[in-house]
Amino acid sequence: MFARASSLFVLALPVLAAASVLPRQSNQCNTGSIQCCNSTQSATSSIVSILAGLLGISAGSITGLVGVTCSPITVIGASGTSCSQQPVCCTNNSFNGLIALGCTPINLNL
């Protein structure tokens, strides 16, 4: 009986190991805080080029989506922290909310 139980356990290990490496959908932002932006634009859009020029950023170095007029969302679900525009996770939020670079849209309603 012990041999059957131990062989079942040994056979179940690969299944458990495979389940732990599956990617998970998460609302976490591993590159910074979650931002609520009034809009997201392509890095090649004219508004992004204008704003980047005003901030002294080379427009050619910007890739991906750019958040425009962003503010951080500190606690999801707390009163007053909802985002009715586009919630995003961005890699560079160092422009006082005017623009945020390297943004990826996220869904806060999951």
Image (cartoon, rainbow, N blue to C red):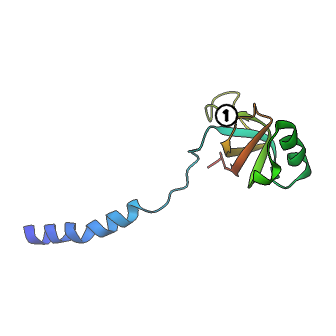
Residue found at x 42% / y 62%: 21
Seen in the picture, residue 89 relative to 63 is either above or below; the reply is: above
Q: Is residue 1 visible?
A: no
Residue 17 location, quadrant:
bottom left
Along the line of sight, the residue nearer the viewer: 45 or 69: 45
- Residue 29: image location, x then y, percent: 59, 44
Quarter holding the N terminus? bottom left
- Residue 86: image location, x then y, percent: 76, 45
Q: How many labels does the image show?
A: 1
Along the line of sight, the residue nearer the viewer: 19 or 91: 91
Residue found at x 75% / y 52%: 61
Along the line of sight, the residue nearer the viewer: 90 or 75: 90
Residue 15 is left or right of residue 72, and the answer is: left
Residue 84 location, quadrant:
top right
- Residue 75: image location, x then y, percent: 61, 32
Residue 95 is left or right of residue 8, and the answer is: right
Residue found at x 30% / y 69%: 14
Kindly identify the amino acid type of the residue bearing the numbered disc 1. Ile
Circle 1 SS class: loop
Q: Which residue is under mark 1?
A: 73
Seen in the picture, residue 55 relative to 21 is either above or below; the reply is: above
Q: Is residue 70 visible?
A: yes
Residue found at x 68% / y 41%: 92
Extreme-top residue of the structure:
79
- Are there few (<14), some (14-19), or many (20+) residues within 10 Å of tag 1? some
Residue 37 location, quadrant:
top right
